[in-house]
Every structure is written in C-alpha cells, then in structure tokens.
Image (spheres, rainbow, N blue to C red):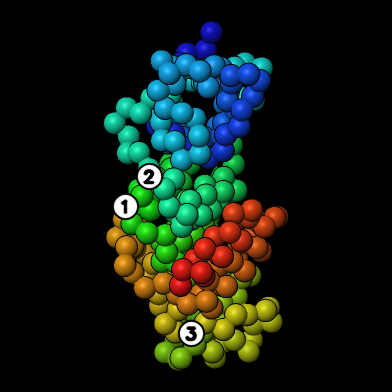
Amino acid sequence: MPAEETTPAIVLRARDYAESDRIVTLLTRDYGKLGGIGKGAKASRHRFERKLEPFSHVMLHFRRRPHGQLVFITRAEAADLAQFRIEEDLGRIALGSYMLELTDTLTAEASEANDAYHSLSSALAALSSGCADAALRQAFELRALGWAGYGLEFARCRVCSNVADTDSVYFVAGRGGVVCARCHDRVAEGAIRLRAESAAALAKLGAMRIDEVGGATPAGPDGALAISRFLNSILDRKLRTAEFLDSILNGAG
Ligand SMILES: [Zn+2]
C-alpha cells in the first residue's frame, strides 16, 4: 500500500458520491492541485473532523492509488489551520467563490502550486476578517495571474519602458500591460484607455501583500475592464462566478 502523505489543503470544489462519499478538488500546499475521494466522508466525524466543502481548510491525509486519478483521502482535520468565515455574508460568498474558481482555472493538476496555496489562503483570511470589495478582488486577480505566469505591468510602458506622465495610458492584453500615449499609435492591437489613477492603483495593488490590502484604493471600472479583458484572453471559458460577483460588487458600490 502506498505511504500516507500529509499536507495542508483548501477545498476548491466538492460533490457527493454514492451514499456517503465525497469527491473533492483540493489545492494543497505541498503537492499542487489534487482530486480525491473521501470514503464515508458524509458520516464519519472521526476521520473527517472537517467537512469536505468549498472553503474548508484542512490538514489532509491521503494515499495515492496506483491505478486511479483520485487520491484516497484517509483523514481531514482542522489541526491549527486558520478557518475561513465566508458563509454568513453574500459579498464574501461571491468574492470567495470567485477566488476558488479563478484558482482552480489557473492551476493544473500535479504542478507546483505553493504560491497559489499561500495567496489563496491569505486572501480568504483577509476576506474572512474584512469585507468583499474591489481592491481585494483586484489584488487577488493580479496575484493569481502572477503565480500563473502572467505578471501584468501597470507602472511602465511595455514598449519604451518609460513611466507615463500623462493623464492616461493604454492597456493592451496582448502586451501584458500598459503602453504610453506616445507608443500607443505604434501598437495595432485593441487597447483600453486607463486613467493614470487606475493604472497607479493597479500597480500598487499588484505589489502589496494581500493582508495589507484592506482599505486600499481600487482601480475604477476602466481598470476592472482591463483585468477582465486579459482574463478572457487567456481562459477558454467565462468564469461561472464572475457575473454574480460583478452584480454584488456593483450593487454595493
Ligand atoms: Zn511608451
């Protein structure tokens, strides 16, 4: 029998299987994204001290199965891991669900995901103790794109590297960042005009620690459009949770 392995993990997705089992997708700290099955997970409070539900933060004990895609989850405990409080507030549910789906979409199974685990756990902790707002959303989106290999540039022109000193710059998805007004004419692709304040806000949020984002100034609708345009350019489908989040954040603001 394969040896038991242990790692902290966050449940991204979960569904019931057969009478008492759960099939889950988890982002683990040490082994990347894993799919697993918890036999008897709906009934056993002994082995499954923590329910396997989205947002559950667990110490995962599992064995790999020689001929199966899903690992066999033997236990899930709270240990001393931070527990996220997402359920009581609609804004937190909307932003938290979006964070889970974005993380799920940007990670591949069995690839290294240490940065992804740390940014998701600090973002869910920040969400648990603060409120769901555009600054936290944008900071997380930029961080997630960063660990997925798409670091976006908002401080300097992607063409001439100069810091723009004009009222606005232009975000070009194909360039992974902004170009200045002088270089804009030489860039053929579709561009989104960004006010200098929005570009500055995104540059700042992208460099900030997630736990320091509370109260920071978000970019305006032009900055939000730039990020969503970029996400659409790299993802093959629209995120299921994005529309709900947009309606909640816009309604609140
Ligand atoms: Zn330029």
Element under disc 3: strand
Q: Which residue is mark 2?
A: 85
Using the rendered image of the protein, determine whether residue 134 is visible from the camera's viewpoint: yes
- Of 88 and 117, which appears nearest the observer? 88
* Residue 129 vertical position relative to residue 200 in the rendered view, above or below: above
- Mark 1 CB in 8 Å range of ligand 1? no
Tell me the kind of residue under disc 2. Arg
Q: Residue at 52% across / 12% down in the picture?
A: 2
Element under disc 1: helix
Q: Which residue is mark 3?
A: 195
Q: Decide: few, some or many residues near mark 1? Use Cα within 10 Å; few <14, some 14-19, many ≥20.
A: some
- Of 196 and 220, which appears nearest the observer? 220
* Residue 217 vertical position relative to residue 89 in the rendered view, above or below: below
Q: Position of residue 253 (x, y in %)?
A: 46, 72
Q: Residue at 61% across / 28% down in the picture?
A: 16
Tell me the kind of residue under disc 3. Arg
**Figure quadrant of residue 186:** bottom right
**In-image side of 215 versus 92 (left or right):** left
C-alpha gap between disc 1 and disc 3? 31 Å
**In-image side of 181 versus 190 (left or right):** left
Q: Which residue is mark 1?
A: 129
Tell me the kind of residue under disc 1. Ser
Q: Residue at 64% across / 24% down in the picture?
A: 17
- Is the Cβ of the residue at disc 1 closer than 8 Å to that at disc 3? no
- Is the Cβ of the residue at disc 2 closer than 8 Å to that at disc 1? yes
